[in-house]
Amino acid sequence: MGISFDKALSIHPAALQLRLSRAELLSANLANVDTPNFQAKDIDFAAEMQRYQNKSSLSSSHSVKYRVPYQPSTDGNTVALEVEQAEFAKNQLDYQTSLQFLNSKLIGLKQAIEGK
């Protein structure tokens, strides 16, 4: 009887990949905080994970959405530094949590294989 890594690891690899994609978007937002007409983007993590669970595969083209600014700027830039920093920090913590879950799953599989 073989081990199905997809079943054993559950949604954790997909969650890590999605968190990584989100970190890249948030980093781009932060890097362009002073770029005129730059539109801040984000990924709706919950919606993407719901799509993943329904389709059993993570789409390479995530539903990237533009962030609605709290206060419009005169240069057309929609990046709010405080919002982006907070979202980036939250995403980093969630990424670390996903890594810990995946690590726990792998340790459990290793112990099962070793018969411990």
Image: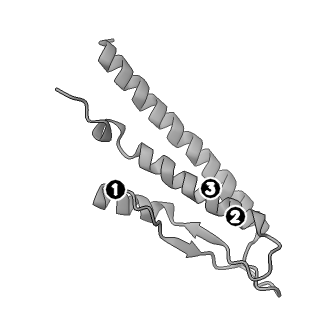
Q: Of label 3 and label 1, which has the lower sequence position? A: 3
**In terms of secondary structure, where does tag 3 sit?**
helix
Query: Horizontal placement of 37 versus 106: left or right?
Result: right
Q: Position of residue 100 (x, y in %)?
A: 52, 34
Residue positioned 47% across, 36% down in the render: 101
Mark 1 residue type: Ser
In the rendered view, tell whether residue 96 sits above or below residue 57. Answer: above
Q: Position of residue 46 (x, y in %)?
A: 46, 61
Residue wearing tag 2: 28
Mark 2 residue type: Ala
In the rendered view, tell whether residue 17 sits above or below residue 76. Answer: above
Label ID, residue 23: 3
Q: Position of residue 74 (x, y in %)?
A: 83, 88
Q: Residues within 10 Å of mark 1 (few under 14, many from 20)?
A: few
Disc 2 to disc 3, C-alpha distance:
9 Å
Query: Horizontal placement of 55 versus 68: left or right?
Result: left
In the rendered view, tell whether residue 24 sits above or below residue 112. Answer: below
What quarter of the picture does the C terminus occupy? top left
Residue wearing tag 1: 57
Q: Of label 2 and label 3, which has the lower sequence position? A: 3
Outermost residue toward the front in this view: 60
Mark 3 residue type: Ala
Viewer-side residue, 24 vs 44:
24
